[in-house]
Image: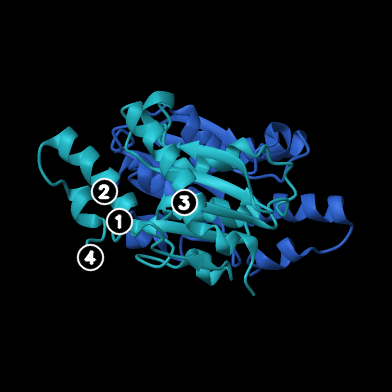
Chain colours: A blue, B cyan
């Protein structure tokens, strides 16, 4: 079944990339996420680990937190999460707790990715996952950050899939 | 190698059970956690999903948050996390991000457990895991809660290992 969300995956990934740009502007590793329901962005988040001094403040977690959960575990039914980078185990686990219906991501993370690379946690929970949407842009903003920050290809750089 | 933490696993699990009791007193699902370094409890947490209206406010996450991370990803070296229930994927993933050195838990969670039951995230990350410490007490407080709340054995009840 083709849904409105399917049709706009690239558009919404661009919104997630705009969030990644906010992270970059704030000196954070540039990763962004948005939550979409019924064709509209209902929450946004960007990586704020440094600013908030909170190692769990990944883009996806910040996005989920903005949704102000009501704790019934199903209130995100119908919500698609868009993330510029493949979600890690922590973020994937949170998405399952929140009852997200669908996940779309850009770049794969060969080291920590839990949605197809290292683990397939979302798939195992029967949550549909779409990979590689605007992945070139999603990788490029990360590579640019690490190159500027470290002056050379980093271990993180190597762990993000190059095609 | 026997460490001080090894010797006190039951004592520290009792501290985690005291945290679970706090959750129970507040009407939450009774799960508790403590973080221990050099033989001393350095942080505590209990499940506060309802009180904080935050579906990620698991006992282990609250414990980790209390440690006020400085974002270097290694600052929890030497820290053991004690949890009354087997950590889920989100909490296990967070422990890996935080660089925890060791995890001890009580009751197994056959449905969501990511430290030996459904997944083995911590083991895969080479983090030593000790299971079943005071597991009878850890299960009993959970069973009591669900029985009182639901009036009958619940799905959650069935998912927590009975021996």
**Label 4: which residue?**
B163
- Mark 3–mark 1 distance (CA, rounded to whole Å): 12 Å
Q: Is residue A70 visible?
A: no
- Mark 4–mark 2 distance (CA, rounded to whole Å): 12 Å
Vertical comparison of B121 with A44: above or below: below
Which disc, if any, is residue B140?
2
- Mark 2–mark 3 distance (CA, rounded to whole Å): 14 Å
The residue at 43%/42% (across/down) is: B32
Find out whether the residues at labels 1 and 2 contact each other: C-beta distance under 8 Å.
yes
Left or right of A111? Residue A36 is left
Find out whether the residues at labels 4 and 3 contact each other: C-beta distance under 8 Å.
no
Mark before the other along the chain sequence, 1 or 4: 1
Mark before the other along the chain sequence, 3 or 1: 3
Judge the density around disc 1: few (<14), some (14-19), many (≥20) Cα neighbours within 10 Å: few
Q: Chain of mark 4?
A: B
Q: Quadrant of residue B160?
A: bottom left
The residue at 33%/42% (across/down) is: A99
Find out whether the residues at labels 1 and 4 contact each other: C-beta distance under 8 Å.
no
Which disc, if any, is residue B136?
1
Image location of residue A69, percent across then percent down: 39, 29
- Mark 1–mark 2 distance (CA, rounded to whole Å): 6 Å
Image location of residue A18, percent across then percent down: 63, 36
Q: Chain of mark 2?
A: B
- Mark 1–mark 4 distance (CA, rounded to whole Å): 9 Å
Q: Chain of mark 1?
A: B
Q: Do pointers 4 and 3 mark residues of a single chain? A: yes
Find out whether the residues at labels 4 and 2 contact each other: C-beta distance under 8 Å.
no
- Mark 4–mark 3 distance (CA, rounded to whole Å): 19 Å
**Label 3: which residue?**
B13
The residue at 56%/63% (across/down) is: B7
Image location of residue A162, percent across then percent down: 66, 68
């Amino acid at each position: 079944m083709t849904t409105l969300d399917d049709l706009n995956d690239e558009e919404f990934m661009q919104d997630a990339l705009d969030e990644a740009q906010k992270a970059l502007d704030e000196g954070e590793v540039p990763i962004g996420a948005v939550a979409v329901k019924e064709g509209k962005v209902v929450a946004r988040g960007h990586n704020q680990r440094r600013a908030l001094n909170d190692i769990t403040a990944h883009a996806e977690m910040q996005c989920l937190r903005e949704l102000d959960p009501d704790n019934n575990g199903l209130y995100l039914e119908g919500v698609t999460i868009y993330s510029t980078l493949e979600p890690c185990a922590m973020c994937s686990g949170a998405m399952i707790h929140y009852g997200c219906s669908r996940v779309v991501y850009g770049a794969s993370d060969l080291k920590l990715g839990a949605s197809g690379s290292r683990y397939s946690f979302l798939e195992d929970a029967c949550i549909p996952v779409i990979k590689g949407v605007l992945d070139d842009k999603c990788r490029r903003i990360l590579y640019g950050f690490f190159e500027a920050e470290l002056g050379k290809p980093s271990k993180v750089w190597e762990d993000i899939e190059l095609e």
